[in-house]
Structure formats: structure tokens, C-alpha cells
Amino acid sequence: MLAISNLTAAYGTVPVLNGVSLELARGEVLALLGRNGVGKTTLLRTITGLLPTLSGAVTLNGAAITGLSTHAISRLGVALVPQGRGILAKLSVRENLEVGGRAAAGRKPAPIAEIVSRFPNLADRLDQPGGTLSGGQQQQLAIARALSARPTVMLLDEPTEGIQPNVVQDLGELIRTLTRDTGLSVLLVEQNIDFALHTAHRCAVMEKGRIVHEGSPDELRSDAVLKRYLAI
């Protein structure tokens, strides 16, 4: 569904991605792990066109999207849920969902009733300003807003940051259910290793702007891998 080949990117003259290659299958959750500052968020920004690609390629379902504008990539079916959620605080839950649906273009946005059926906490808050929701509810709204555009690929950046443990567990189940029911592909950047390993079908580890390890969640649970790439 999503293929990244030898991707390089930089902030000014400072290289951040150094030949990243990854593949994400349909209906798969791929967790991208690594210490802070290794390039995980930069990879998501480069995929979505927020940061220019210096070299390499990104393809979506076989079609090149490298060099396209951010809004064009979004309309082709790539949704980004950024770190910090990025909801529109003064708009209602309903209005946030309507704004998200505009990225659907020719696919037509998902009906609000269909979206909130997966998010019971939002169903009774459609007219409530997004900024008044709890942290967990805001994260649900951010994901729901992305789903409004009927994406085929969702990029999740630190979705468990600042939310309660019981909500974290529910979020993991939601992600796995979405991929199973809809075929949605998810690239998950996450610092919560337990959450990532529980949620993902497959894992990749970044270090210094490169992919240095790929394997199953069980492989990542080994002390050798955790100590080498993820220990602080």
C-alpha cells in the first residue's frame, strides 16, 4: 500500500533521513520505534509533503507521490494524525469532522454517524467545542477527523502521549479493529513500547535516520534488541 525507497530529507543543511526504506501492507499496523531525535516524525512529514524530499521515492498503491503538494497527497488517501493532535479547539466536534471530510475529494467523506459509531465518547459531544474535551477524547477526535476522509493509509504520531492508561488500551484495540474491518494501513510512531508491541503486526526501528531493524513484536521484546536500540 505504501512503499518508501531510499528516502533522504534534511532541515536546511542538516540531514535527518539517510536512505530510509520501508513497506506497509494493506491492513497492516507497522510500529516505527526509536529514541527521540532519530527521524521518526521527520519521516511522516516527508511522506506527507510537509518536508521536501532530497532523494528517494514514496509510492501509494504503486503510484508515485514524491514531490506532490500536501493537500494532493491527503486527497489521494494519506491521513496524518500529528503529535499533539492538532484539533481545531474552537470548532465543535461535528465541525472538526466536517473539516476532515473535505480531504476525501472524489471518495466522498464518511457520514458523521458512521464515524462516531466507532467513538461512543464523541457521539454525545458533537456540538461541544473540541478544546473542551479531555486529552483522550481529543485524541479520538483527531483520529475520527482523519477517518472522515476515508483514507487508505493513516500516519499516527505519538497517539498515546498525555492520555490515561485505560484510554491507551482502548486506542490500541480501535486501531487493530479499524485495520481488520476496513483494510486501513497504519504507520504508528510511538514511544510507548508496550503499546506499540501490543498494537502492531510488525515493527521497525530507526537510528540516526536509518532503519536498523525490522521484525515481529516478539523479536522486539528481546532484551538484546531493546537494549541496543531503545534503551535510554
Image (cartoon, helix red, strand yellow):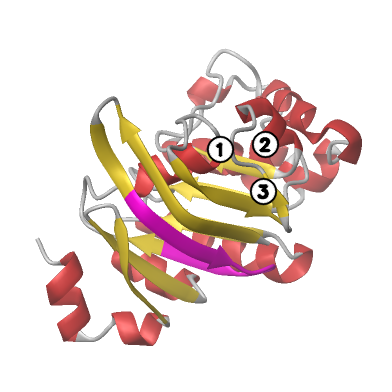
- Circles 1 and 2 in contact, beta carbons < 8 Å: yes
Instruction: Measure the alpha-carbon separation of dots 3 and 1.
Output: 26 Å
Question: What residue appears at the point 56 percent right and 13 percent down from the top-left corner?
Answer: 90
| Residue segment shown in magenta | 18-31
In the rendering, which numbered label is found on residue 119? 3
160 vs 232, nearest the viewer: 232
- Residue 77, position as x, y percentages in the image: 73, 44
- Name the dominant secondary structure of the magenta segment: strand
Note whether residue 192 is visible: no
Q: For the view shown, which residue lies furthest in the top direction?
A: 90
The residue at which mark 2 appears reads as: 73
Between marks 3 and 2 in the image, the one whose residue lies nearer the viewer: 2
Q: Is residue 187 left or right of residue 69?
A: left
The x, y position of residue 18, in whole percent, is 31, 51
Nearer the observer, 212 or 229: 212
Looking at the image, tell me whether mark 3 or mark 1 is earlier in sequence order.
Answer: 1
